[in-house]
């Protein structure tokens, strides 16, 4: 470890190892180490352009920064006797070029604006990558839905057989939820991709800095303008964790269904062995462990959100060191979410659906009774509540056929369905699950013509979302590679 230049003045350099390790954010800073070099390069280019630093000295610093950018960070910068990666990199720089040169990079900035910038640089990249992975999951759902617009299955409320639907309809409901998760992340990027640099400790700086220039070099869309807010605001972090928690909540519900569907009681799905584990004692077991771990990780992500809000809520303006404790929760939430989304696509893509079992269960428990009541209303003029009562009473008698319905109609409403023209044929046609699905053709419903329409529409949305992800990714990569190219010119 190089000497820690931060501790040469006000404090003695010596600090017990346990205190140093306790204070250090080094473990989590591995996430932002690459971003920190980019932020250093941008800051140095701004200092140079604004003639705050002598060009010859800037060149010497830039040579080291670009060497690190190209060759990776030296191991010494990660020593957790440094408080953080910023101190580690500065110490390395000073060791390489001497304090008279290396000691000038930190002019007009603080670790406070530096770390906030690094988190934003890294987070936008992570979220956009997550959105790309989410797109793949949504594609698997839409494609699988397209293969199952005619696959009839039971739909549940209260986990009781309720009404028949189709597998396409069921899968599209998840795609709708994941689509909103995608939109939420895209909306969050607008608030994340703003640059705190130039805020310094919190009160900005008296050097003639150019905040817009560093912001544009780093591919930001604008400034996190108020400098006190720029260093202390972490709602962008809480928002990102919340996006992840919400996404994971939907994923966890799907996982719950996968676990349920793969149980022998239900047997709607057969998972690929790749996504299952066995038991150390029960040799016959095939357990849906990936889905279960994912349900569990949702708790981890929700916990990160709760920890984050609790951490931030009592902090006065502006920067407080507590904020350092927030960042690991962010990375843990992002990592859990990204790995889950990617695995969920693979798991679903490799699963086999048992459509015979689904069909078998579709009308269990009088699940087609609603349509029968509706037929009595639509074709025979009964008020819905009367029809509902008659069908319910017939179910209570244990069977849904013309005889029980006729008896029920007499009891409930003192009328004869037979006199109204209801026949055996009418009853059995109304109780056919396929018929009930065919007539539910309103937008968003399970009828094949409705789900086929929905699938076409969602494919259009997916294409637009893919263009957004690609454009954003390319724009950020271009900004950063242009900046590095400009930096190389500086050292020519
Ligand atoms: N490691 C710190 C963090 O993550 C960086 C900022 C430190 N600032 C300070 N004034 N001690 O928040």
Image (cartoon, helix red, strand yellow):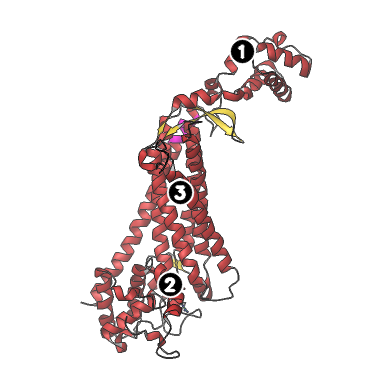
Q: Tell me which residue sits at (73%, 16%) in the image.
A: 408
Residue name at image x 53 percent, y 25 percent: 362
Region of the chain picked out in magenta, as a range: 450-455
Q: Distance between the residues labelled 2 and 3?
A: 28 Å
Q: Does the magenta stretch include residue 442?
A: no
> Which residue reaches farthest left?
492
The crowding category of the residue bearing disc 1, from other C-alpha atoms within 10 Å (few below 14, some 14 to 19, many at least 20), is: some
Please tell me which of labels 3 and 1 falls first in the chain.
Answer: 3
- Badge 3 marks a residue whose secondary structure is helix
Residues at marks 1 and 2, CA–CA distance in whole angstroms? 72 Å
Residue 484, image quadrant:
bottom left
Q: Is the magenta stretch mostly helix, strand or loop?
A: helix
Q: How crowded is mark 2: few (under 14 residues within 10 Å), some or many (20 or more)?
A: many
Q: Position of residue 331 (x, y in %)?
A: 44, 62
Compared to residue 219, the image places residue 107 above or below, namely below
Marks 3 and 1: which is nearer the front?
Answer: 3
**Residue 426 image label:** 1
Quickly name the residue at label 3.
Answer: 293
Local SS, label 1: helix
Q: Position of residue 190 (x, y in %)?
A: 47, 60
Confirm if mark 2 falls within 8 A of ligand 1: yes
Q: Name the residue under label 2.
A: 25
- In the rendered image, residue 456, in percent from the top left (x then y), is placed at 43, 35
Total numbered labels:
3
Quadrant hosting residue 282: top left
């Amino acid at each position: 470890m190089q000497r820690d230049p931060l501790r040469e003045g006000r404090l003695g350099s010596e600090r017990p190892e346990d205190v140093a390790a306790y204070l250090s954010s080094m473990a989590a800073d591995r996430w932002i180490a690459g971003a920190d070099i980019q932020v250093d390069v941008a800051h140095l280019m701004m200092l140079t352009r604004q003639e705050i630093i002598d060009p010859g000295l800037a060149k010497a610093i830039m040579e080291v920064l670009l060497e690190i950018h190209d060759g990776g960070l030296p191991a010494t910068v990660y020593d957790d006797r440094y408080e953080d990666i910023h101190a580690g990199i500065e110490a390395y720089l000073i060791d390489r070029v001497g304090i008279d040169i290396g000691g000038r990079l930190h002019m007009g900035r603080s670790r406070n604006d530096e770390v906030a910038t690094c988190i934003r640089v890294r987070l936008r990249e992570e979220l956009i990558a997550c959105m790309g992975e989410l797109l793949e999951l949504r594609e698997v759902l839409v494609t699988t839905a397209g293969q199952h617009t005619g696959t009839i299955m039971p739909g549940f409320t209260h986990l009781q057989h309720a009404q028949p639907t189709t597998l396409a309809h069921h899968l599209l409901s998840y795609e709708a939820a994941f689509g909103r998760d995608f939109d939420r992340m895209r909306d969050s990027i607008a608030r994340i991709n703003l640059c705190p640099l130039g805020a310094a400790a919190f009160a900005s700086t008296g050097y003639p800095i150019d905040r817009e220039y560093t912001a544009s070099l780093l591919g930001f869309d604008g400034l996190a303008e108020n400098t006190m807010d720029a260093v202390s605001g972490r709602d962008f972090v809480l928002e990102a964790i919340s996006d992840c928690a919400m996404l994971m909540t939907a994923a966890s519900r799907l996982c719950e269904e996968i676990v349920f569907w793969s149980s022998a009681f239900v047997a709607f799905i057969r998972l690929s062995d790749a996504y299952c584990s066995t038991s150390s004692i029960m040799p016959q077991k095939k357990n849906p462990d990936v889905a279960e771990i994912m349900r569990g990780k949702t708790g981890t992500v929700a916990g990160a959100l709760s920890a984050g809000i609790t951490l931030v809520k009592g902090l006065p303006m502006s920067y407080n060191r507590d904020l350092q404790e927030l960042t690991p929760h962010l990375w843990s939430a992002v990592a859990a979410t990204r790995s889950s989304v990617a695995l969920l696509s693979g798991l679903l893509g490799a699963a086999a659906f048992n459509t015979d079992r689904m069909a078998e269960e579709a009308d269990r428990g009088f699940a087609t009774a609603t349509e029968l009541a509706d037929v009595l209303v639509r074709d025979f003029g009964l008020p819905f509540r009367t029809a509902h009562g008659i069908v319910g009473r017939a179910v209570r008698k244990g069977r849904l056929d013309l005889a029980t319905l006729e008896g029920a109609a007499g009891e409930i409403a003192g009328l004869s369905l037979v006199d109204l023209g209801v026949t055996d044929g009418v009853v059995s046609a109304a109780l056919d699950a396929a018929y009930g699905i065919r007539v539910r053709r309103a937008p968003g419903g399970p009828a094949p013509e409705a789900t086929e329409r929905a699938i076409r529409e969602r494919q259009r949305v997916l294409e637009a979302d893919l263009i957004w992800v690609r454009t954003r990714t390319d724009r950020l990569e271009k900004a950063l590679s242009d900046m590095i190219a400009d930096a190389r010119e500086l050292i020519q």
